[in-house]
Image (cartoon, rainbow, N blue to C red):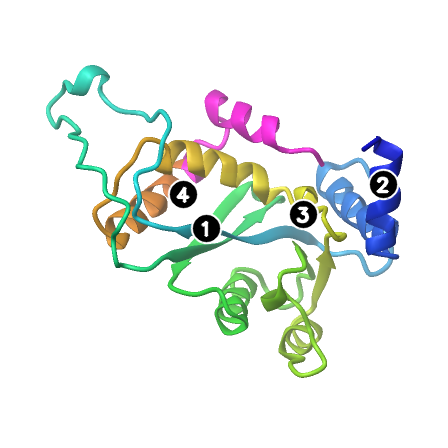
Amino acid sequence: MSFQRLKTWKQSRDPDYEAKKNRILHLYGLMDGTCDAQAGDPDVVICVDEFGPLNLQPHPGRQWTHRGGRGPTPRHRRRATYHRPHGVRHLIAVYDLSRDRLYGHVKPRKRRGEFLTFCRYVRSLYPPRVRLAIVLDNASPHLTTRHDRRVGQWAAANNVELAYTPTNASYLNRIEGHFAALRYFTLAGTDHSSHAEQANMIRRYIIWRNRNAHDERLREIVNRANVA
């Protein structure tokens, strides 16, 4: 499919495709310093999404460890099994473009209730007078529906703008590049024995990432994955 046909198909799926895309690019421009602020524009732009499902199956790929298993604490590979009755977990995460920081909570489910709880946590990180814009995709827990208006009501009451990516364009969410790095540094080549062990590694990575945001290898992976 040619680029023009693909663009036409996407616009047919979402009549507001261009308007949503341009709004998100404008928000990114505000944080990058390439756009002038207009009336109603936010002070801070953040990107929110879920990463997962996080299961306990062995994950292929390379990882950071001692070469050949040497060192004070050699890492031994557990026997691979693809039948572990422990369910899955989901990482709900936010990337703050103004602070260049990543935050996240591991949850057993990713329903609207969990999403709103995380949004309240994110809102608590900033003074109420600071207007936020949240870039997010069209997953059902993120939407205000005819039967459940909690998301829209929360945003209106808390000085928050919800900027949804166009249909089939979730790649415009800049947190996707940070998920690529998270997968590389925490999941590739692992075989965690429990969800607690896996969640602990993810938390340790987020702490390390926020302290080493300019790490050359980290930036290479993020920049390669980002398109907006």
For residue 205, what is the image quadrant? Answer: top left
**Residue 215 percent location from the top left of the image:** 46, 25
> Disc 1 or 4, which lies upstream in sequence?
1
- Ranked by sequence position, the earlier of labels 2 and 4 is 2
Residue under numbered circle 2: 7
**Residue 113 versus residue 194: which sits nearer the camera?**
194
Magenta segment range? Answer: 209-228
Residue at the spot 76% in from the left edge and 48% down from the top edge: 24
Q: Is residue 226 magenta?
A: yes
Residue type of the residue flagged with mark 4: Ile
The CA distance from mark 4 to mark 3 is 22 Å
Residue tagged by mark 3?
170
Q: Residues within 10 Å of mark 4 (few under 14, many from 20)?
A: some
SS under mark 3: helix
Q: Mark 3 Cα within 10 Å, few/some/many (few <14, many 20+)?
A: some
Q: Report the mark closest to the observer, 4 or 3.
A: 3
Residue highlighted by disc 4: 206
Instruction: From the image, tell me which residue sits under label 1.
Output: 52
Q: Residues within 10 Å of mark 2 (few under 14, many from 20)?
A: some
Which quadrant holds the N terminus?
A: top right
- Indicate which disc, 1 or 3, sits on the residue closer to the N terminus: 1
Q: Which element is circle 1 on?
A: strand
The answer to which of marks 1 and 2 sits earlier in the sequence is: 2
Q: Picture coordinates of residue 198 (x, y %)?
A: 29, 47
- What residue is drawn where x is 32% and y is 60%? 87
User: What is the quadrant of residue 15 in the picture?
Assistant: bottom right
The image shows residue 142, relative to residue 11, as above or below, that is below
Q: Is residue 207 left or right of residue 127?
A: left
Predominant SS of the magenta segment: helix
